[in-house]
């Protein structure tokens, strides 16, 4: 069965889809979780029973229709069940980022008016307790893992399994009320509230309806022919809209199995064991995987290195063509099959990618070289463009039309238009209802006809109908000479190098571009060991002259590449410095989804930006940092500033060769 044929209007809520799945294929696997090294599986029928028991337990605690129920923790079946159980009760699940600190959680918990929170463990319990006195409506908390919580005050603190037990005991008494609430759920009732990452300010609560989730899940599942026997690995933040649509929207529509890893530390092992057929990862994950591959190759024998590079050169040339079903010569096919046996197959198996039918990346633009590398291996990696307010899908790449420089065509049911200023607008069945308690922002983002402003600049190719995103509209600007400034374009090119983890480019309204660079500690550390370079800290390694020489080579190679693009050649990096610390969400420099907060970084490191532009050879700085235990401290450093070679714009005849 390719996908379920029942119309979306026939199942008007996620709990209704759950009931259908339990009824029609109750024995099929719905969830798996690895615990203590062993995979445990729940069928759809068992899942419905677990969720119903917890929903009844929530009723015993007094959960009312319209209540907000916060859900905090790593990907676990119990926390997914908690969200669906809340919906079953007529309440609204509000997942939070598990790595958010107490202050960040306090804002969301208070803003949504959460009366209840379902959390994973002691760490999350402690964060909520720390701020609960500041929460206007908060009453009770439910935890999954009891370790470390025995001596806590349990008057308003409950074990997840105990709440389920209370629900089962009260089933006869409370089932009629639960049935009334479940049956009353409408297509336009709220399904979930997801908070934006807050790139430019306070996070906003995006209200998504059952219609948004189900229509988006249905259309995207049919687009890629997702099936009940597909497998996904749920490892991305539960507060992120992508995880919600993949692990609940599409999973409940299609009926495939959601697999939860044991921990972040075992993720790669669990990925290899599950070998998902449907996979999503943001660009940073693919960047990290490519970095690890390159590190392993550096450590391999000369023969293996030669073989790897020989077959990868061939794969880059013909792999994507074979993947798209385009004509390729017989000898090239034979050579590619040999490469599959010797290189590509073992590499995919080691990464857990041996069974992927459909893979996606989104959230940030991915470097073309990284994207092409994975497609060359025969992995059907595609790009989609979306946002929380669209219930993910705005554009999507059809098989056979996959390119690294576009984000595809409008997803099913989506309309696109480009504003006079180049900003991308869309409307679709997935268009969000509103920003919670924020009618002003809702009106600024969504007009009365349902068109939503994305905040991204782009254009639609006339020949193909594909959308090309240039950059965030607010980040695209002009250089002092009038040339286009698009920082993401440059940053993504630099991040192709395994040694570079993060880049922030400056240059709007200036005569030249300059950059902050973060090294990748694992990649550069491995390189340093091979070159007998001793270091005792990230800061010492980042400032080592040989590391700076290496980064300078990467910058200059990137400049040579940028010079071939006539429109963006002015974005070559003239000067750079390697930061003495990694940019960190805990320090406010990145969002919880790892997006750069440009304004915050520009203000926080204003002394460094000024030094890049005033001709200084070095700059002394002191920076406040947040340690893992929440303590604050200061690190001091004198950073060397390097000039990088820039290249003249390539002539048209040279670029065409």
Image (tube, rainbow, N blue to C red):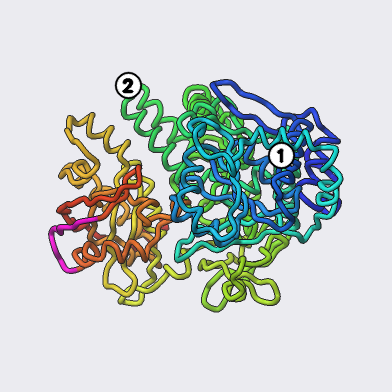
**Residue toward you, 395 or 338:** 395
| Secondary element type, mark 1 | helix
The image shows residue 255 at horizontal and vertical percentages of 75, 38
The image shows residue 359 at horizontal and vertical percentages of 59, 41
The image shows residue 447 at horizontal and vertical percentages of 65, 76
Q: Outermost residue toward the left? A: 617
Label 1 sits on residue: 54
Q: Quadrant of residue 112?
A: bottom right
The region drawn magenta spans 614-623
Q: How many other residues sit within 10 Å of disc 1, few (<14), some (14-19) or many (≥20)?
A: many
- Residue 20 horizontal side relative to residue 57, left or right: right
The secondary structure making up most of the magenta span is strand
Q: Is residue 14 above or below residue 34?
A: below
Quadrant where the C terminus sits is bottom left
Label 2 sits on residue: 301
Q: Residue at x 61, y 74 (%)?
A: 439
């Amino acid at each position: 069965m390719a996908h379920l044929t029942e119309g979306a209007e026939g199942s008007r809520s996620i709990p209704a889809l759950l009931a259908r799945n339990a009824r029609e294929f109750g024995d099929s696997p719905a969830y798996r979780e690895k615990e203590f090294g062993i995979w445990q599986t729940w069928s759809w029928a068992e899942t419905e029973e677990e969720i119903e028991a917890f929903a009844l337990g929530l009723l015993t605690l007094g959960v009312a229709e319209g209540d907000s129920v916060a859900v905090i923790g790593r990907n676990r079946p119990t926390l997914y069940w908690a969200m669906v159980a809340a919906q079953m009760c007529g309440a609204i699940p509000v997942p939070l980022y598990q790595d958010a600190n107490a202050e960040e959680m306090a804002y969301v918990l208070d803003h949504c008016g959460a009366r209840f929170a379902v959390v994973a463990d002691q760490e999350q319990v402690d964060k909520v307790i720390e701020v609960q006195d500041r929460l206007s409506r908060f009453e009770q908390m439910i935890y999954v893992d009891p370790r470390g919580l025995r001596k806590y005050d349990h008057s308003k603190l409950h074990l997840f399994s105990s709440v389920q037990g209370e629900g089962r005991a009260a089933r006869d008494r409370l089932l009629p009320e639960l049935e009334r609430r479940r049956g009353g759920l409408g297509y336009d009732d709220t399904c979930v509230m997801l908070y934006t990452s807050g790139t430019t300010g306070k996070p906003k609560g995006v209200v998504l309806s059952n219609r948004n989730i189900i229509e988006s899940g249905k259309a995207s599942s049919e687009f890629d022919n997702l099936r009940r026997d597909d497998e996904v690995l749920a490892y991305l933040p539960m507060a992120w809209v992508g995880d919600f649509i993949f692990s609940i929207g599409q999973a409940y529509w299609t009926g495939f199995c959601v697999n939860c890893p044991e921990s972040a530390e075992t993720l790669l092992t669990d990925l290899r064991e599950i070998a998902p057929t449907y996979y999503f990862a943001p660009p940073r994950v693919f960047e990290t995987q490519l970095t690890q591959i390159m590190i392993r190759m550096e450590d391999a024998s000369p023969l293996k290195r030669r073989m790897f590079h020989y077959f990868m050169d061939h794969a880059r040339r013909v792999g994507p063509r074979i993947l798209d079903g385009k004509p390729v010569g017989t000898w090239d096919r034979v050579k590619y099959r040999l490469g599959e046996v010797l290189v590509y197959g073992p590499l995919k198996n080691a990464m857990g990618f041996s069974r992927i039918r459909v893979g996606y990346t989104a959230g940030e633009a991915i470097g073309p070289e990284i994207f092409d590398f994975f497609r060359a291996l025969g992995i059907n990696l595609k790009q989609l463009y979306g946002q929380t307010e669209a219930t993910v899908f705005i554009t999507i790449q059809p098989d056979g039309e996959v390119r690294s420089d576009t984000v595809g065509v409008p997803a099913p049911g989506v309309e696109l238009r480009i504003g006079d200023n180049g900003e991308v607008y869309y409307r679709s069945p997935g268009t969000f209802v509103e920003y919670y308690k924020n009618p002003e922002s809702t009106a600024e983002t969504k007009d009365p006809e349902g068109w939503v402003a994305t905040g991204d600049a782009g254009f639609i190719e006339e020949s193909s109908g594909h959308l090309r995103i240039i950059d965030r509209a607010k980040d695209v600007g002009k250089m002092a000479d009038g040339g286009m400034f698009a920082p993401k374009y440059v940053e993504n090119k630099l991040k192709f190098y395994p040694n570079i983890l993060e880049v922030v480019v400056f240059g709007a309204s200036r005569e030249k571009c300059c950059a902050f660079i973060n090294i990748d500690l694992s990649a550069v550390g491995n390189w340093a060991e091979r070159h007998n370079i001793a270091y005792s800290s990230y800061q010492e390694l980042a400032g080592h002259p040989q590391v700076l020489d290496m980064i300078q080579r990467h910058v200059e190679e990137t400049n040579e590449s940028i010079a071939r693009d006539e429109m963006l050649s002015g974005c070559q990096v003239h000067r750079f410095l390697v930061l003495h610390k990694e940019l960190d969400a805990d320090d406010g420099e990145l969002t919880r989804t790892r997006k750069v907060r440009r304004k915050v970084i520009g203000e926080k490191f204003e002394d460094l930006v000024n030094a890049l532009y005033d001709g200084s050879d070095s700059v002394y700085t002191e920076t406040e940092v947040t340690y893992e235990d929440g303590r604050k401290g200061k690190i001091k450093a004198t950073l060397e500033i390097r000039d990088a070679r820039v290249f003249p714009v390539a002539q048209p005849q040279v670029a065409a060769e």
